[in-house]
Image: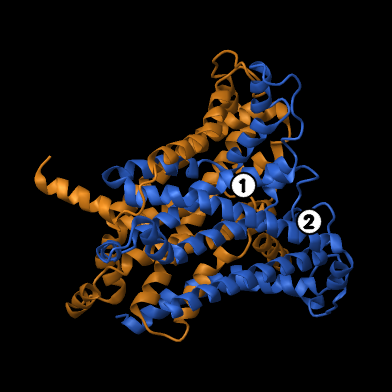
Amino acid sequence: MTATTRRVRRGAIGVGNTRLPLGPAYAVLLLLLYLPIVLLAVFSFSANTSLSFPLEGFSLDWYGKALADPALVGAARNSLVVASTAATAATALGFAVSMAVLRFRFAGRRLLLALAAAPLVVPFVVLGVALFLVFNLLGVPRSLMTIALGHSVVALPYATLILLSRIIGLDPALEDAAMDLGASYPTTLRRVILPLVGPSLLSAWLTSFIVSFDEVALANFLAGGDPTFPVFLYGQLRFAGRLPVLIAMAVLLMTVTIILTLIANRLRSRHA
Amino acid sequence: MLGRRGSLRFLAVPPFAWLILLFVAPLLLAILISFRGERGPIDFGSLLQLSTLQYAKVVDSPLWLRLLGISALMALIVAVVATTLAFPIAYFLAFRARHRAPIFLVLLLVPAATSFLMRVMAWKLLLGSSGAINSFLLWTGVIQEPIGLLLYSQAAVVITLIYVWTPFAALPIYGALQRIDRSHLEAAADLGSGPWSRFWRVTVPLSLPGVLATFFMVFIPTVGEYVTPFLVGGTDGIMYGNLIQDFFTRAGNWPLGSALAVIMLVTTLALVGIALRVVNLRRAVA
């Protein structure tokens, strides 16, 4: 270790506050957070039908049964469709909100920003009830599309926050330069802005996708006969015998969400 | 060629329209429906026949409002404990982990990204009378009879929700702590301030807006919970959200359900408004 790094390190300790053993505390808290999930995953590989000790036998049976169950696979596919649709809408709208708010002065500017963040302060059960009533009044039958519409609203604050924090750091001179050179504003957006915010758009999309993919409280009110995976799960969880198969499918889908979360995090930290 | 002004319309109109149609109008409709006298199908023709019957029913049923109070109290406990547990996690990431922070952050993101229903179910399996905790204790001989009181109680709901929210809560606090200018802490140290006084007089006040945002990020969804109480709460652990959900499904009384939902929305927004005012005042004083 060189003298400089030692000095930097000592400096870093100097600005910290206390010297409580936070490392071990962090490890213990993480362990507590992981324990239930790990137990659940272990359970899905065991031959038991209830989670009790000692665990018996390793088996992939539940996974085989889950993937052979048309209702489960159908619900998982529905979730993919709903989450992709909601994420695409939320990202496009979040981008529009961010550009409008950061690049223009207009009468409804603060209102637009407040509205885009407002779904965060409304409990899902209230929004679920409200959307249920609107679709009912307009005669729109409940379907995967109504769930996707609802999810696009609750994902919008997340998409907007991610895109705002990226676009706020972009120099408006880039757009001015493109337009001085004869590009129209839509062309400038497409050829200059979009490539610069590309990774953040992907991060906003993935975050919105995850918000929708895992959401059940709102979707419950908006689902028709064809459920998303969380809605299906919610309806089936009280049947104890079905539990191992449901958990196996959930573990498979969770693996996908965890990977997506890590990608989104990586994109955000690299381009923040 | 489309100029900038034309582009503004192109950018601002779609999100405005979307939010008005799918956020503002639905909430206003719920308010209108809550002022309907009778249940039954809703249509445009009868929307404006207003009555305060549903609110009178709510006032006459002190049990419902008591349940709102209980739910708010449960949400308060969950939000306070989750934020308190999340603070040292975030503090460790922001000030102690240094170059290893990205790895520790990933370790925290994994439980946060785990399915909400699965994390609730994990606790159902842990707390149940033939569940992991009981069978483990029986197996090791610590107890002879399974403990029955673990599941289906308010405590089970609160414990499960604290578990669900803690990893999420750490993320915004981490962001707030990261934004603190380290030179403030150096200045405090140079002026002779000790570690604890730096923590309480610099770090905590500067992170307060982030901590408060986190508190509400947990409190608002929790106060409206109906999924977790349904799964681990049983009849003793039901919350106000279950009441609303029941009126929209089994009991089929939309106006009454709407009135209960509107009362919850107003309560929540009032609490957020008060909190924002308190924090702004502090900022004005500082």
**In whole angstroms, how far apart are the C-alphas of marks 1 and 2?**
19 Å
Q: Position of residue B39 (x, y in %)?
A: 86, 66
Residue B243, numbered label:
2
User: What's the colour of chain B in the image?
Assistant: blue
Q: Quadrant of the N terminus of chain B?
A: bottom left
Q: Position of residue B68 (x, y in %)?
A: 75, 61
Disc 1, SS: helix
The chain coloured orange is A
Residue type beneath disc 1: Leu
User: Seen in the image, is B70 located left or right of residue B55?
Assistant: left
Front residue of B125/B53: it is B125
Q: Is residue A57 above or below residue B181?
A: above
Q: Is residue A83 visible?
A: no
User: What residue did someone put label 1 on?
Assistant: B161
Residue A50 in which image quadrant = top right
Q: Position of residue B33 (x, y in %)?
A: 77, 71
Q: Are marks 1 and 2 on the same chain?
A: yes
User: Seen in the image, is B174 located left or right of residue B168?
Assistant: left
Disc 2, SS: helix
Residue B3, numbered label:
none
